[in-house]
Image (cartoon, rainbow, N blue to C red):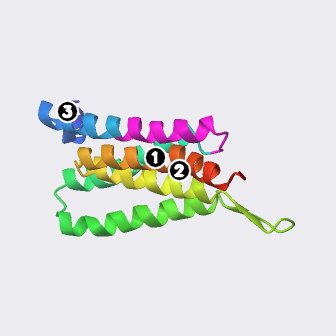
């Protein structure tokens, strides 16, 4: 029984000190919140990828870079991990894009781009670049919420 308990302690030792727990909690929570902000904007516009999707994408991307960092992976080697995240999110985004033959119209590009941006924000959170993640979220919100209004005003006949 002592060996079992020792094995369990070793298996759950990745968050041994309060500083590490705080760092992981902060990065994952911020990723979830920022992803949720973008997801809320998309959901309020009636888009399929809403709050939960964006939160999970951001947290997943953050976790994919956070865990290798905890394991001691060098920053230069994280580029391969980030490439995998980008490829995976690209696959996810491709599922959101529809081309309607009858109307020659493509739907879902903004949703796919939003999920892509959310993953990038999650990566920034996971790498500990919280300010960059916050600024990126603000800029993404401007693109998603304000740019359409500006474009609509400019295209209305006078």
Q: Which residue appears at 16% of the width and 57% of the height?
A: 72
- Residue placed under numbered mark 1 in the picture: 142
Q: Are marks 2 and 1 in contact (CB under 8 Å)?
A: yes
Q: Which residue is mark 3?
A: 22
Q: Nearer the viewer, mark 3 or mark 1?
A: 1
Farthest residue, direction right = 102
Mark 3–mark 2 CB contact (< 8 Å): no
In whole angstroms, how far apart are the C-alphas of marks 3 and 2? 37 Å
Q: Residue 147 shows which numbered tag?
A: 2
Q: Closest to the observer: 99 or 78?
A: 99
- Residue 16 included in the magenta stretch of the image: no
Q: Residues within 10 Å of mark 2 (few under 14, many from 20)?
A: few
| Residue 81 falls in image quadrant | bottom left
Question: 145 or 16: which is nearer to us?
Answer: 145
Residue at x 41% of width, y 61% of height: 85
**CA–CA distance between discs 3 and 1?**
30 Å
Query: What residue is at 61 percent from the left and 54 percent from the top?
Result: 154
Which numbered disc, 3 or 2, marks the residue closer to the eye? 2
Residue stretch in magenta: 31-48
Q: Residues within 10 Å of mark 3 (few under 14, many from 20)?
A: few
Spatial CA span between label 2 and label 1 = 6 Å
Left or right: residue 95 versus residue 26 is right
Q: Earlier in the sequence, mark 3 or mark 1?
A: 3
Q: Which mark sits nearer the N-terminus, 3 or 2?
A: 3
Q: Is residue 143 above or below residue 43?
A: below
Which type of secondary structure does the marked residue at label 3 adopt? helix
Give coordinates of residue 2: x percent, y percent. 18, 31
Q: Disc 3 vs disc 1: Cβ atoms closer than 8 Å?
A: no
Magenta stretch, overall SS = helix
Picture disc at residue 28: none
């Amino acid at each position: 029984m002592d060996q079992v308990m020792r094995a369990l302690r070793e298996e759950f030792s990745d968050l041994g000190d309060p500083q590490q727990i705080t760092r992981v909690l902060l990065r994952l929570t911020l990723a979830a919140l920022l992803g949720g902000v973008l997801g809320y904007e998309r959901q309020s516009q009636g888009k399929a990828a809403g709050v939960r999707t964006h939160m999970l994408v951001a947290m997943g991307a953050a976790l994919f870079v956070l865990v290798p960092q905890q394991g001691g992976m060098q920053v230069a080697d994280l580029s391969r991990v980030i490439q995998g995240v980008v490829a995976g999110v690209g696959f996810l985004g491709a599922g959101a894009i529809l081309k309607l033959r009858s109307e020659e119209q493509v739907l879902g590009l903004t949703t796919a781009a939003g999920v892509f941006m959310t993953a990038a924000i999650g990566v920034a959170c996971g790498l500990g670049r919280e300010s960059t993640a916050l600024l990126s979220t603000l800029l993404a919100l401007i693109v998603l919420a304000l740019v359409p209004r500006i474009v609509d005003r400019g295209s209305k006949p006078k």
